[in-house]
Image: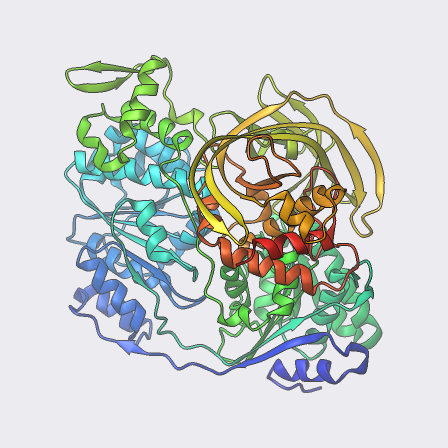
Amino acid sequence: MTHDPDAGATIDALALDPDRAGRIVFDARIPARPGRTATLGAPLGAPLAERVAARGIAGLWSHQAAAIDALRAGEHTVVATGTASGKSLCYQLPILDAVGEGATGTALLLFPTKALAQDQLRSMRSWLVPGVRAVTYDGDTPPEDRVWARRNANVVLTNPEMLHLGILPSHDRWATFLMRLEYVVVDELHSLRGIFGSHVALVLRRLRRLCARYGADPTFCFASATIGNPEELASALLGAPVTAITEDGAPAAARRFVFWQRPLLDEALGTRASANQETADLLAAFVADGHPTLAFTRSRRGAELVAAAARRTLERTDPARAERVAAYRAGYRADERREIEAALSEGSLLGVAATNALELGIDVGGLDAVVLNGFPGTLASLRQQAGRAGRSGRSAAAVLVAGDDQLDQWYAAHPEQLLERRAEAAVVNPDNPFVLRPHVACAANELPLRPEDEEWFGPNLDDAVRELVLADLLKPRDGRMFWAGRTPPAPAVGLRTGTSEEYALLTEDDGTGHRLIGTVDGARVHNVAHEGAIYLHRGRQFRVERLDEVDHAAWLEPADDLDEYTQPREETDIAIAATERSAPCGIGTAHLGRVVVSNRVIAYQRRRIGSGESLGVVDLDLAPRELDTRACWYTVPAASLVAAGVDPSRITGAVHAAEHALIGLLPLFTICDRWDVGGVSMALHPETGDPTIFIYDGYPGGAGIAELAFAELARHIAETLDLVRRCACDDGCPSCVQSPKCGNWNEYLDKAAAITLLDLLAD
């Protein structure tokens, strides 16, 4: 049987199917883009130029040439171009030129995962350039290999945590490497946002400070998926100006991009058909037409369900192809994963359903189509995942199946924005005192602090030093500040949290002991890791069996087969510590400043995943916790609400529903998700004297999200009002004013009153 090589033909057939009428709400045909080459300002060294020619690389794409020229000229550079545009070559060639035979330079490359570092190590070594001694240096590196790396390696591939814990505190052992350091690469820049990005910013400043101590001034190269502010983000991370290269010169295949809306089952309640089933049907359709296809799902369990449903569909129509569909997820043995990867590369496997959190080692060069089960949270992620198809030059297709929440449904109403809208901005806040202070302590332990170190740590250095002195952790001597703590500070500083109070998330490791699967900061542990909580990690589901608040650990058990999720119930108060800025907002006012949130988790509810049916409520006895953070809040006069037709008894429902909708659409303007922020709404806040809605950063000290919400308040409110007005449900649903993380289980929501309130706040 022969099939049309264009995956768009499958979409055409789906569009003509009367049983699927109305599913396609957006269908864009994106023409192929030819590549643009450019010549380097100065040629590569002869040995490396020969290697490039031997690979059949006739010319460099324009963005590659621009990046290489900038880096070789000593300019800090960020390359933010599309998937498969050859970003790795931008830094590989300057590094290979600087460290090859006869050269004395070194290079440090940072990747967010060990898997990416290993892939890049294989790539660097494959050039076979004489004199290049490249190694990975991470938690899996044996002691003897670490010694060899420190003494001999000239290219070290590692991750931010290992730089923070294993290299900077032992910089004297790395003295020769650091004094010769010419290039530092920071890959996956778009993942360095919020608290994690703020920590990494301080780690990079500590690195630059030590390099200066050894007489080096390395050039930094950041590589990123397309984001809204690559130059701004890279500069904030580095603490120095960075040149952005965003014009993609690589060729791109023609593609179809389709937005797929699931049919409404109950318009009044806003319920729609199963997203897993719709995704499975699409995967089966592409596979039936012979197109290698990857379907991204939101969970490990979802990957299994989608793969199984696609196989069942194919068994009825094309049994031979049913056997060519598989799930690919964390938890499989390494040999099982390699077997699936090989089968996809060879073409014996046509369809794969995988978690979108999984770092796929699959060779995706031959994919014709990608199906996304729900908007992945950001345009940057959407474009990166959709770009996995079509790398072979054949026409490709990407289908986004709309999910239930506010962001998915906003894009369903404005689908053209998926292609036209500028990607969201990513924000960091290295001035956050809860982040700055521990890194100043680490820096003092590495090298005594001097007043001149303000160059690296900014004007808030004095405040951080003063607090550390008062805590007897720093001691002055001869005009410098020396570390005086009993133990080194770095091991107590987790890069993923905004506080030193960090809880380890542990699970049994095949009966041989425990395995760390992640960490959570103390400010959020009661919400996400209370006893009985269902915790999702990289597409896998766990149940928290025990929370140990003495040893700061939560013990988890695998719960992948459990068809339920949990929602905590909270009592929350919020106090305004400082109002820094205010601005008119319709007839109300928006404010930005510091707040203190007091939160107590008093119970949790078990709910069935598919239907949302309640499976029971469990009481909890947990102490209240305080969070000192940043917030943007909105006030509107109660009299104005009443005059607009909202009875005083409905104001609680109005502010609560508007709060949910505002939080749900905040990711339109910043790379964050609803789990990075919190919300509190009150019909009468004791300090403002008005109905008030707070949106606050979910981390101590803030991560910069509140500032961006304040900067975009007019657009944010207008888009939220449009979304809630457009939603066809009667009283509120997950697509408009309900929230999966509501601390009051989505009680006391008034959609109609929220529309009136948002209308009053809109300009």
Residue 376 in view:
yes
Residue 373 in view:
no
| Quarter assignment of residue 724 | bottom right
Q: What x and y, as percent, mark residue 265?
A: 83, 65
**Quadrant (top left/top right/bottom left/bottom right) for the N terminus:** bottom right
* Residue visible at 65% across and 20% down in the picture: 623
Q: In the figure, is residue 161 to the left or right of 292?
A: left
* Residue visible at 62% across and 41% down in the picture: 691
Q: What x and y, as percent, mark residue 59?
A: 28, 76
Q: What x and y, as percent, mark residue 453?
A: 21, 31
Q: What x and y, as percent, mark residue 460?
A: 30, 31
Closer-to-camera residue (325/389): 389
Would you place residue 198 above or below residue 316 in this image? above
| Quarter assignment of residue 523 | top right
Would you place residue 542 above or below residue 402 in this image? above
Closer-to-camera residue (415/137): 415
Would you place residue 533 above or below residue 241 in this image? above
Q: In the figure, is residue 59 to the left or right of 608?
A: left
Closer-to-camera residue (640/44): 640
Q: Which colour scheme is used?
A: rainbow
Closer-to-camera residue (424/440): 424
* Total count of labels: 0
